[in-house]
Amino acid sequence: MNAREPDWAYVARSLVKVLAVAAALFLALSAIERVLWLFVDFDDERMARVYGTAARVANPDKRLLFDYSDGGGLLETTYTLRGEPRRAGPGEGRTGYKIVENLFGTIRAPHLDGPSGVLGDAIDSVDVDLGVNKALTEEARKTVDGLPQTLEAVAVVEFTHPMTTERLVAFNRRHEFCGGKDVSYIYAPSFYDDSSKVTSMNAVVWNRDMTKQHWEDLTYECETEPEAALAEFRRWAGLLGEGDDFSEFELSHDWLTGAAEEGVVYGLVVDRWKLADLRKLLDDPEVRTVNLADVAFDLG
Protein backbone atom coordinates (compact mmCIF):
# COMPACT_ATOMS: atom_id res chain seq x y z
CA MET A 1 0.00 0.00 0.00
CA ASN A 2 1.40 3.40 -0.93
CA ALA A 3 1.51 6.03 1.81
CA ARG A 4 -0.60 9.04 1.06
CA GLU A 5 1.40 12.15 0.18
CA PRO A 6 0.73 15.11 2.54
CA ASP A 7 -1.29 17.99 1.16
CA TRP A 8 1.47 20.56 1.23
CA ALA A 9 -0.85 23.36 0.21
CA TYR A 10 -3.08 22.63 3.20
CA VAL A 11 -0.05 22.51 5.49
CA ALA A 12 1.13 25.86 4.18
CA ARG A 13 -2.30 27.46 4.67
CA SER A 14 -2.49 26.12 8.24
CA LEU A 15 0.96 27.46 9.03
CA VAL A 16 0.04 30.88 7.67
CA LYS A 17 -3.11 30.89 9.84
CA VAL A 18 -1.09 30.00 12.97
CA LEU A 19 1.42 32.77 12.25
CA ALA A 20 -1.38 35.25 11.60
CA VAL A 21 -3.08 34.40 14.90
CA ALA A 22 0.24 34.67 16.79
CA ALA A 23 0.95 38.05 15.19
CA ALA A 24 -2.57 39.27 16.03
CA LEU A 25 -2.16 38.18 19.66
CA PHE A 26 1.20 39.91 19.88
CA LEU A 27 -0.25 43.14 18.49
CA ALA A 28 -3.24 42.90 20.82
CA LEU A 29 -1.04 42.37 23.88
CA SER A 30 1.16 45.30 22.82
CA ALA A 31 -1.90 47.50 22.43
CA ILE A 32 -3.27 46.40 25.82
CA GLU A 33 0.09 47.11 27.44
CA ARG A 34 0.17 50.63 25.96
CA VAL A 35 -3.34 51.26 27.27
CA LEU A 36 -2.50 49.85 30.70
CA TRP A 37 0.44 52.22 30.99
CA LEU A 38 -2.18 55.02 31.10
CA PHE A 39 -4.13 53.48 33.96
CA VAL A 40 -1.84 51.09 35.86
CA ASP A 41 1.14 52.16 37.93
CA PHE A 42 3.88 49.61 37.40
CA ASP A 43 5.73 51.47 40.19
CA ASP A 44 9.37 51.06 39.24
CA GLU A 45 10.15 53.36 42.17
CA ARG A 46 8.69 50.97 44.73
CA MET A 47 10.50 48.06 43.12
CA ALA A 48 13.75 49.98 43.55
CA ARG A 49 13.00 50.96 47.15
CA VAL A 50 11.78 47.54 48.27
CA TYR A 51 13.50 44.88 46.16
CA GLY A 52 16.64 46.81 45.23
CA THR A 53 17.29 47.46 48.91
CA ALA A 54 16.41 43.88 49.89
CA ALA A 55 19.00 42.64 47.40
CA ARG A 56 21.63 44.84 49.04
CA VAL A 57 20.60 43.63 52.52
CA ALA A 58 21.00 39.98 51.48
CA ASN A 59 24.21 40.44 49.46
CA PRO A 60 26.71 42.42 51.54
CA ASP A 61 29.51 40.57 49.75
CA LYS A 62 28.89 42.92 46.81
CA ARG A 63 29.13 46.68 46.48
CA LEU A 64 25.87 47.29 44.61
CA LEU A 65 26.33 50.99 43.94
CA PHE A 66 24.27 51.76 40.85
CA ASP A 67 20.78 50.83 39.74
CA TYR A 68 18.31 51.52 36.95
CA SER A 69 14.99 50.28 35.66
CA ASP A 70 14.80 48.54 32.29
CA GLY A 71 11.15 49.55 32.07
CA GLY A 72 7.91 47.95 33.13
CA GLY A 73 5.59 45.88 31.02
CA LEU A 74 2.41 43.86 31.03
CA LEU A 75 4.13 40.60 31.91
CA GLU A 76 7.17 41.69 33.90
CA THR A 77 9.28 44.58 35.16
CA THR A 78 13.07 44.41 35.21
CA TYR A 79 15.31 46.31 37.58
CA THR A 80 19.11 46.13 37.38
CA LEU A 81 21.74 46.62 40.06
CA ARG A 82 25.36 47.12 39.05
CA GLY A 83 28.22 46.33 41.36
CA GLU A 84 31.33 44.34 42.11
CA PRO A 85 32.59 41.86 44.72
CA ARG A 86 33.49 43.49 48.04
CA ARG A 87 37.25 43.09 48.08
CA ALA A 88 40.00 44.93 49.93
CA GLY A 89 41.93 45.65 46.74
CA PRO A 90 41.09 47.59 43.58
CA GLY A 91 37.74 46.97 41.92
CA GLU A 92 37.37 44.28 39.30
CA GLY A 93 34.76 45.96 37.13
CA ARG A 94 31.01 46.17 37.63
CA THR A 95 28.53 43.44 36.76
CA GLY A 96 24.80 43.78 36.18
CA TYR A 97 22.42 41.80 38.44
CA LYS A 98 18.80 41.67 37.32
CA ILE A 99 15.68 41.58 39.48
CA VAL A 100 12.54 40.61 37.57
CA GLU A 101 9.00 40.93 38.91
CA ASN A 102 6.26 39.19 36.94
CA LEU A 103 2.58 40.02 36.59
CA PHE A 104 1.74 38.04 39.76
CA GLY A 105 4.34 39.75 41.96
CA THR A 106 6.82 36.86 41.95
CA ILE A 107 10.47 37.91 42.03
CA ARG A 108 13.36 36.28 40.18
CA ALA A 109 16.95 37.32 40.99
CA PRO A 110 19.10 34.20 40.55
CA HIS A 111 22.42 35.95 41.18
CA LEU A 112 21.29 37.77 44.34
CA ASP A 113 20.38 34.85 46.59
CA GLY A 114 22.85 35.65 49.35
CA PRO A 115 26.52 36.24 50.18
CA SER A 116 29.20 33.84 49.02
CA GLY A 117 32.93 33.36 49.32
CA VAL A 118 35.06 34.10 52.37
CA LEU A 119 33.03 37.17 53.37
CA GLY A 120 29.84 35.14 53.12
CA ASP A 121 31.37 32.51 55.42
CA ALA A 122 32.44 35.20 57.89
CA ILE A 123 28.94 36.68 57.99
CA ASP A 124 27.41 33.23 58.43
CA SER A 125 29.72 32.58 61.38
CA VAL A 126 28.03 35.30 63.46
CA ASP A 127 25.66 33.58 65.87
CA VAL A 128 22.76 34.57 68.10
CA ASP A 129 24.42 32.86 71.07
CA LEU A 130 27.70 34.78 71.10
CA GLY A 131 29.45 35.09 74.44
CA VAL A 132 33.06 35.53 75.44
CA ASN A 133 35.53 33.13 73.84
CA LYS A 134 39.06 34.02 74.94
CA ALA A 135 40.70 31.38 72.77
CA LEU A 136 38.89 32.67 69.67
CA THR A 137 39.83 36.27 70.50
CA GLU A 138 43.48 35.35 71.01
CA GLU A 139 43.54 33.44 67.73
CA ALA A 140 42.24 36.54 65.94
CA ARG A 141 44.94 38.67 67.63
CA LYS A 142 47.68 36.33 66.42
CA THR A 143 46.29 36.37 62.87
CA VAL A 144 46.12 40.17 62.72
CA ASP A 145 49.51 40.62 64.46
CA GLY A 146 51.14 38.34 61.89
CA LEU A 147 50.24 40.70 59.04
CA PRO A 148 51.47 44.20 58.13
CA GLN A 149 49.28 46.62 60.06
CA THR A 150 49.00 48.99 57.08
CA LEU A 151 47.07 46.42 55.05
CA GLU A 152 43.45 47.23 54.28
CA ALA A 153 40.86 44.59 55.09
CA VAL A 154 37.28 43.59 54.56
CA ALA A 155 36.23 41.87 57.77
CA VAL A 156 33.42 40.91 60.14
CA VAL A 157 33.58 42.07 63.75
CA GLU A 158 31.62 39.84 66.14
CA PHE A 159 30.41 41.15 69.48
CA THR A 160 30.27 39.12 72.68
CA HIS A 161 26.58 40.03 73.05
CA PRO A 162 23.86 41.79 71.00
CA MET A 163 24.51 45.55 71.07
CA THR A 164 21.75 48.11 71.54
CA THR A 165 22.04 51.41 69.70
CA GLU A 166 23.07 53.15 72.92
CA ARG A 167 25.90 50.68 73.50
CA LEU A 168 27.04 50.99 69.89
CA VAL A 169 27.21 54.76 70.17
CA ALA A 170 29.30 54.37 73.34
CA PHE A 171 31.48 51.80 71.51
CA ASN A 172 32.06 54.27 68.65
CA ARG A 173 32.97 57.07 71.05
CA ARG A 174 35.32 54.81 72.99
CA HIS A 175 37.23 53.95 69.83
CA GLU A 176 36.82 57.37 68.21
CA PHE A 177 35.59 56.06 64.89
CA CYS A 178 32.82 57.21 62.62
CA GLY A 179 30.23 54.74 61.43
CA GLY A 180 29.71 55.47 57.76
CA LYS A 181 29.45 53.74 54.41
CA ASP A 182 32.35 51.45 55.37
CA VAL A 183 30.46 50.07 58.40
CA SER A 184 27.34 47.88 58.08
CA TYR A 185 25.28 46.46 60.92
CA ILE A 186 24.25 42.81 61.25
CA TYR A 187 20.73 43.11 62.68
CA ALA A 188 19.99 39.39 62.37
CA PRO A 189 22.49 36.53 61.95
CA SER A 190 21.86 34.01 59.20
CA PHE A 191 19.62 31.08 60.08
CA TYR A 192 19.61 27.44 59.02
CA ASP A 193 17.43 24.62 60.31
CA ASP A 194 16.57 21.78 57.92
CA SER A 195 13.88 20.54 60.31
CA SER A 196 11.79 23.71 60.03
CA LYS A 197 9.38 24.79 57.29
CA VAL A 198 11.67 27.67 56.32
CA THR A 199 15.07 26.02 56.25
CA SER A 200 17.29 29.10 55.92
CA MET A 201 17.39 32.88 56.06
CA ASN A 202 20.18 35.22 55.08
CA ALA A 203 21.68 37.60 57.59
CA VAL A 204 20.16 41.07 57.68
CA VAL A 205 23.06 43.45 57.01
CA TRP A 206 22.21 47.14 56.91
CA ASN A 207 23.87 50.41 55.96
CA ARG A 208 22.08 53.71 55.27
CA ASP A 209 23.98 53.90 52.00
CA MET A 210 21.70 51.12 50.71
CA THR A 211 18.67 53.40 50.47
CA LYS A 212 20.23 56.43 48.82
CA GLN A 213 20.48 57.04 45.10
CA HIS A 214 24.00 57.07 43.68
CA TRP A 215 23.75 60.76 42.79
CA GLU A 216 22.76 61.76 46.33
CA ASP A 217 25.18 62.91 49.01
CA LEU A 218 24.67 61.37 52.43
CA THR A 219 25.95 62.97 55.62
CA TYR A 220 26.92 60.27 58.10
CA GLU A 221 26.62 61.05 61.79
CA CYS A 222 29.93 59.56 62.96
CA GLU A 223 29.69 58.27 66.54
CA THR A 224 25.89 58.50 66.58
CA GLU A 225 25.46 56.86 63.16
CA PRO A 226 23.95 53.68 64.74
CA GLU A 227 20.94 55.78 65.75
CA ALA A 228 20.43 57.10 62.20
CA ALA A 229 21.03 53.64 60.72
CA LEU A 230 18.41 51.97 62.91
CA ALA A 231 15.89 54.75 62.24
CA GLU A 232 16.35 54.34 58.48
CA PHE A 233 16.17 50.56 58.72
CA ARG A 234 12.87 50.80 60.59
CA ARG A 235 11.55 53.37 58.11
CA TRP A 236 12.39 51.04 55.23
CA ALA A 237 10.88 48.01 57.00
CA GLY A 238 7.67 50.04 57.36
CA LEU A 239 7.41 50.21 53.56
CA LEU A 240 7.26 46.42 53.24
CA GLY A 241 4.03 44.53 52.71
CA GLU A 242 3.20 40.97 53.75
CA GLY A 243 2.61 40.12 50.10
CA ASP A 244 6.09 41.19 49.01
CA ASP A 245 8.12 38.28 47.68
CA PHE A 246 11.57 38.13 49.31
CA SER A 247 12.08 34.38 48.88
CA GLU A 248 14.64 34.82 46.10
CA PHE A 249 16.83 36.73 48.57
CA GLU A 250 16.24 34.12 51.31
CA LEU A 251 14.49 36.79 53.38
CA SER A 252 10.90 37.29 54.48
CA HIS A 253 8.63 40.09 55.61
CA ASP A 254 8.57 38.79 59.21
CA TRP A 255 12.34 38.19 59.28
CA LEU A 256 13.07 41.77 58.18
CA THR A 257 10.44 43.55 60.27
CA GLY A 258 11.31 41.43 63.31
CA ALA A 259 14.99 42.41 63.03
CA ALA A 260 14.00 46.07 62.67
CA GLU A 261 11.73 45.91 65.71
CA GLU A 262 14.37 44.19 67.86
CA GLY A 263 16.98 46.71 66.70
CA VAL A 264 20.08 45.07 68.19
CA VAL A 265 23.35 44.47 66.36
CA TYR A 266 25.25 41.18 66.49
CA GLY A 267 28.28 42.26 64.49
CA LEU A 268 29.72 44.65 61.95
CA VAL A 269 30.82 44.23 58.34
CA VAL A 270 33.70 46.67 57.86
CA ASP A 271 34.96 47.64 54.43
CA ARG A 272 38.59 48.51 53.70
CA TRP A 273 39.70 49.17 57.27
CA LYS A 274 43.35 49.25 58.27
CA LEU A 275 44.44 46.16 60.18
CA ALA A 276 45.85 48.45 62.88
CA ASP A 277 42.35 49.80 63.56
CA LEU A 278 40.86 46.30 63.66
CA ARG A 279 43.61 45.19 66.05
CA LYS A 280 42.57 47.87 68.57
CA LEU A 281 39.02 46.51 68.62
CA LEU A 282 40.27 43.09 69.72
CA ASP A 283 41.29 44.57 73.06
CA ASP A 284 37.72 45.66 73.76
CA PRO A 285 35.85 43.22 76.05
CA GLU A 286 32.71 43.63 73.91
CA VAL A 287 34.47 42.26 70.81
CA ARG A 288 34.51 38.49 70.51
CA THR A 289 36.59 38.15 67.35
CA VAL A 290 37.45 39.64 63.98
CA ASN A 291 37.15 37.42 60.90
CA LEU A 292 39.23 38.67 57.96
CA ALA A 293 37.63 38.12 54.57
CA ASP A 294 40.21 39.85 52.38
CA VAL A 295 43.34 41.97 52.77
CA ALA A 296 45.35 44.09 50.35
CA PHE A 297 47.97 46.81 50.30
CA ASP A 298 46.68 50.32 49.79
CA LEU A 299 48.23 51.18 46.44
CA GLY A 300 46.51 54.58 46.31
Image (cartoon, rainbow, N blue to C red):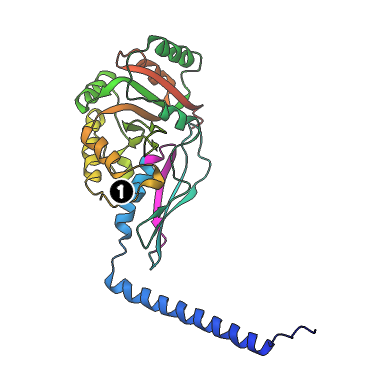
Q: Quadrant of residue 62?
A: top left
Q: Identify the residue at horizontal 31%, vertical 50% (top origin).
A: 50
Residue 181, given in percent of the width and then of the height, sits at: 34, 36
Residue sitting nearer the eye, 22 or 228: 22
Residue 143, given in percent of the width and then of the height, sits at: 48, 15
Residue 214 seen in the figure: no
Residue 24, given in percent of the width and then of the height, sits at: 47, 82
On the image, numbered disc 1 is attached to which residue? 216
Question: Which contiguous range is marked in magenta?
Answer: 58-71
> Seen in the image, is 219 located left or right of residue 117?
left
**Relative to 267, is 102 above or below?**
below
Residue sitting nearer the eye, 98 or 242: 242
Q: Quadrant of residue 75?
A: bottom left
Residue sitting nearer the eye, 26 or 176: 26
Q: Identify the residue at horizontal 27%, vertical 23% (top origin).
A: 162
Pick the quarter of the image with the N terminus. Answer: bottom right
**Relative to 227, is 240 above or below?**
below
> Seen in the image, is 24 located left or right of residue 223?
right
Residue 96, given in percent of the width and then of the height, sits at: 48, 51
Q: Identify the residue at horizontal 50%, vertical 18% (top origin).
A: 148
Queried whether the magenta region covers residue 64, the answer comes back as yes
Secondary structure state at the residue bearing disc 1: loop
Queried whether the magenta region covers residue 196, the answer comes back as no
Kind of residue at disc 1: Glu
